[in-house]
Amino acid sequence: MTKRLSGNGGNLSILAGAQNGISEEDARILRGLRAGVESAYEELIERYEHPVYSMVYRLLGNQTDACDVVQEVFLKVFRGVSAFREQSSLRTWVYRIAVNEAHNHRRWFARHCRREVPLEKDNLEHDGVIEYAHDPGPSPYDQALDTETRVLVERALTRINPLFRTAVVLRDIQNMSYEEIADILQISLGTVKSRIVRGREALRRELSQQPQQGFAEALA
């Protein structure tokens, strides 16, 4: 007999989500996932597969790798849903797993497939001190209005420090709040803002080197 995803939780641990800071919609999906309801799995994938792939692809810059990582992300979500403590939204939890998997894949690739220069933090975080910089305004991605320019931005993203890239992708492409990003990356709000600013500046520097006429001026 096929199970249905209903609003009655029975003996399941999720109630309505209000006590745990998760939405009723999250609570409903979690009830279904924990009860093994097929439609809950389908709804979770339908809701998050495309945005998670979009983020992972921009973190890794390779379609095949991104597909492999996304599959692993949802396997970990399905296997770990019983242990999810509901201290953040379902979306934040899924994205946290996705970011970690993308970073793990990058580290594995660096160790096994090529020699890669170790990441430098560019004085971002040192001795517990966070260096702040002024946010110069709209992100470079916001200014990418045509397909050709978007392609240039995508390529430039792969050339900036992954620490900064992740923050920029979550903020400027995934449209997440600073608080969500801090929760996903498990860092402070100040560090989130600093990484975004430095990531945007690094992206502008990459884009300013493009030979297209007027491109550098548009990013000034």
Image: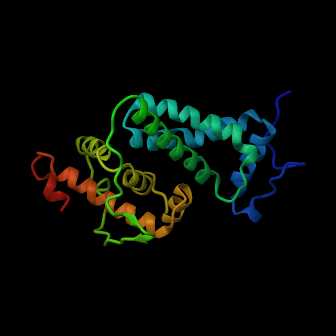
Q: Is residue 64 left or right of residue 14?
A: left
Residue at 27%, 50% (x, y): give it: 145
Where on the picture, by quarter, is residue 130? bottom left
Residue at 12%, 46% (x, y): give it: 212
Q: Is residue 33 left or right of residue 220?
A: right
x%, y% of residue 109? 42, 33
x%, y% of residue 168? 38, 55
Camera-side residue of 46 and 75: 75
Q: Is residue 7 left or right of residue 172?
A: right
Pick out the residue farthest to the front: 127
Q: Quadrant of the C terminus?
A: bottom left
Q: Quadrant of the N terminus?
A: top right
Where on the picture, by quarter, is residue 18? bottom right
Q: Is residue 161 left or right of residue 166?
A: left
x%, y% of residue 134? 31, 72
From this view, report whether residue 87 is shown above or below residue 207.
Answer: below
